[in-house]
Image: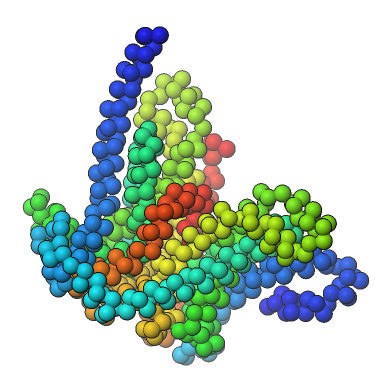
Amino acid sequence: MNTVDANLTHRRKKISLNQWILTIVLSLGSFVMIVPFLWMLVTSFDWAARLHINFPPRLWPEEPSIKTFEVAFTSIKMFRYISNSILVSVGVIIVSALSALLSGYALSKLRFKGANIVLLLALSTMMIPFEMTMIPQYLLFSKMGLVDNYLAFYLPALNYAFGTFLAKAFFDQLPTTLREAAILDGAKEVSVFGRVYLPLCTPIIATMVILLFLGVWNDMLWPLLILKKATKYTIQIGLAMFTYNNGIDKQPSIIMAATTVSLIPVVVVYMFLQRYIIESIALSGIKQ
Amino acid sequence: MSLNAKMKTDTALKPQVKRKRRFTRNDWMGYLFSAPLIIGVLAFAIYPMIAALIMSFHQTSGLSIGGKWVGLSNYDYVLSDSLFWQALTNTLFIGIWSVLLGIALSFVLASLINNLKWHTGKNFFKAVFFLPNVVSGVATTLLFSFLFYPSKEGLLNFVIGWFGIDPVGWFTNPQVSRYSIVLMSLWGALGYNTIIFLAGLQSVPRDLYEAAEVDGAGTYRKWLYVTIPYLRPIFVFMLIMGTIGGMKRFTDVWLIGGTAGNPGGSLMTVVLYIYRNAFLSSQMGTATAASYLLFIMIFVLTAVMMLLNRRKDSFD
């Protein structure tokens, strides 16, 4: 007994040295990853850095102030941009998730004629890069007079093949007998979907909402093409246009304050759902 | 579009269909439920694909889709445009460096995190390294334009100053700017690859390691001869995803160097080239031809890498 114990403690010690080195190396790496964020935060609260970067770099603002944020909110219309971004995100999430859930349900549970063709078609279009279809899409929407209209975001959201793929895989795991029983009881297809299956779909809905939110909130290319009026800008294009027109490395603390604000939603979502996000990304292996 | 029409006449057709028994009620429900997806795919993937192909054979004027048929001359123009080749070289240069460095670094990182026995620490490091991944391209670029500030005030120049190195014009010197983009994208993408590798590392069967131990392999050799070959599909997946992502580089280079790909055209990329032609000079034909060339390149690269993966798969 005693020798076994001694052996164990001996091993544990040996392991822990190794583990200490690992922890130190990883901590140094994390520090490098975190430094840009720290610099951003320090600068964003520093009134002294509104025109030039502080030299030498500081660990604490020279003139701590939230005036930088006030200026950011007045010179860049952050309130407007953020509410626009929320409007776009919510709409896209609803359209995409509904389209994916409905089609995933149909492909998995209804097994209609041509279901395989539909699935194959949808999945193969995932290979098409957006950069390739953006010009005809832009022309299509400008012809329909939908430039500066958020329908230009909501309508293409119908095509969420990756979500369909996720939803179908999820529905495949749910028993078909649920549907058969409900149909025998005289339930309509829509209520089978909405009342029987949908409540079971929370995990997959959460995954889609997270991935879609991060994708839509952070997107800049499509807003750049389709949004011309500054009052319609989403947060990314608003921020980008402000710096694009004023020079990218001017007004450090104002820009950093605006950037910090633009990051709050994603970082908050990330902090609360961090393990969930990491899991769904590891699982899906595809970032939307 | 024909399916779209079918959906509209769904109710009208029903009795007739029932008699013929060609489509059951189940089938119609299926079409109805998949209608949003089908419409979306047809209108926003298939149609633009075809429209872009047609446009690439036309001399377009302004914003119209049609125009004068010019055959392959748009492709001819793009392929003989030195700016396109410059854009392609830059895109590949930045893409290859960021993909290879990104995969190597994140694999080492994932291996380190995976060997950590301290559970809380494991989750903490995962979370920290992944954090930049949720940050938008715009925010990353703005942040790095200050960190990479060309004078001694920039943080990176300050740090290399400790080692007696003169300030570098990270984003202003055409000799350096492409490497700076690689550095920036490493920061942004490292965590994503790490998470995927970690999932892969946890899937390596224990008995493979045990067998290797019986054969006398140490930690390092197990890593080299068991882990790496077993994870080859993941390496290939990352190569594919990284290459596709790298070929589409736009946001950061546009913000840093504008549509000219400054400094000195060193940050001109293929998508920037497409954007310029389409939205600055309204040469939609040229732009769509370039976008088809981009698509073909992505397609060929992906196919080649998938074929490489299929060969001598010892673990299947």
- On screen, residue A68 versus residue A217, left or right, reads left
Q: Which residue occupies the foreground of this view, A60 or B257? A: A60
Specify the quadrant of the image occupied by residue B169.
bottom left
- Residue A102: image x %, image y %? 66, 64
Q: Which residue occupies the foreground of this view, A75 or A26? A: A75
- Above or below, A12 relative to A228: above
Residue drawn 56% across the image and 79% down it: B51
- Residue B145: image x %, image y %? 23, 66
Residue drawn 39% across the image and 12% down it: A4
- Above or below, A29 relative to B254: above
- On screen, residue B130 versus residue A45, left or right, reads right
Specify the quadrant of the image occupied by residue A20.
top left
Q: Can the viewer see residue A185 in this picture?
A: yes
- On screen, residue A161 versus residue A249, left or right, reads right
- Above or below, A192 relative to A95: above
Q: Can the viewer see residue B286 in this picture?
A: no
Residue drawn 26% across the image and 39% down it: A25
Residue drawn 79% across the image and 53% down it: A181
Position of the C terminus of chain B, as image quadrant, is top right
Specify the quadrant of the image occupied by residue B54.
bottom right
Q: Which residue occupies the foreground of this view, A259 or A273? A: A273
Q: Which residue occupies the foreground of this view, B15 or A209? A: A209
- Residue A171: image x %, image y %? 66, 54
